[in-house]
Image (spheres, rainbow, N blue to C red):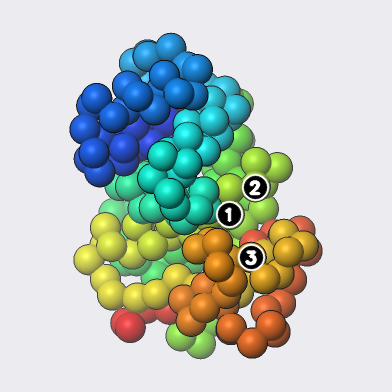
Amino acid sequence: MHGIVHQSLKRYVVEKTDERSWATVLERSGIEPKLYLPVTHYDDAEFDTVLETVATMSGHDRAAVERDVGRFLAEPLLRTFRGHIRPGWDLLTLLTSLGEIAEDLRSKRAETEPPTLSCERISDGVRVGYASDRDYCALAHGVLEGIVTEYGESGTVEKVACVHEDRGKSETGDGYDSENGNGDGSEERGEDQCVFHVVLGE
C-alpha cells in the first residue's frame, strides 16, 4: 500500500487527538513507530491493524473510521498525483477521468496498484464504480467526499451498491440510512464492485 495512505491515517489520529495517542495506537497494535514516506510502500495488514485499533479505542465502527480517513486522504492524493490532472479541469471532469488516471498510474508505475474505477456521467452528477482486491469501499467513499470538498464544491456521495453480501450493513454500522442507501432494503448489489453516485450542487 502506498505510503500516502499510512501517512494520512497517522495525520487523522494526530489531528483528532495528539501524538501521544498515536503512540498508544501503535503500541496496542503491536507496531514499531516509523516514519511513513510517501514514496515507499507498506504492508496492507499494518494499515488494517491500526485502523481496527483506532476504531476500538474510539468506540466507532471500523468502516466509519475508514471513511473518515478517506476524507483526509483526498488532499494528499490530489497533490501527489497532480501531474495526471490537466490544468483547467473542473470537478466534474476530474471525477469522470478518475478511471483513466488509475489506468495511467497502473501502466507507468509498476509498484502502484490503484483500484479499478469506472466513471460515467449521470443526469445529476457522476457514477463511480470501485473494484479492488483490497476491498476498501469505505475509504473510497471518503476519498470521493474529500475530493468534492477540496474543489470547494457542494455535493453528496451516496453508496448505491456494494460488493458485500450483508446488504443491511452500512458504513455507520447500523444499517443503511438516507446518506448511505435507500433505507428500504432495496439497495442494488454491486456484485464485483461498489458503486457511488456523486451528486453535485446539493
Label 3 – label 1 distance at C-alpha: 12 Å
Residue 176 quadrant: bottom right
Residue 169, numbered label: 3
Element marked by disc 2: loop
User: In which quadrant is the C terminus drawn?
Assistant: bottom left
| Residue 33 visible from this viewpoint | yes
Residue type, label 3: Lys
Type of the residue with mark 1: Cys
**Which of pointers 2 and 3 indicates the residue nearer the eye?**
3
Any mark on residue 135, and which? Answer: 2
Q: Position of residue 93 (x, y in %)?
A: 41, 66
Observer able to see residue 195: no
State which quadrant residue 137 falls in.
Answer: bottom right
Choose the circle earlier in sequence order: 2 or 3. Answer: 2
Q: Residue 185's spot in the image, x, y percent?
A: 69, 83
Of 61 and 186, nearer the camera is 61
Q: Are marks 2 and 1 in contact (CB under 8 Å)?
A: yes
Q: Position of residue 189 (x, y in %)?
A: 74, 71
Quarter of the image with the N terminus is top right
Q: Mark 2 and mark 3: span between their CA atoms?
A: 15 Å
- Residue type at numbered disc 2: Asp
Marks 2 and 1 sit apart, C-alpha to C-alpha, by 6 Å
Q: Nearer the viewer, residue 102 or 62?
A: 62
What residue sits 67% from the left and 53% below the top? 131
Q: Badge 1 is on which residue? A: 137
40 lies above or below 130? above
Callout 1: SS: helix
Task: Count neighbours of disc 2 (C-alpha within 10 A) and say few if under 14, some if 14 to 19, many if 20 or more.
Answer: some
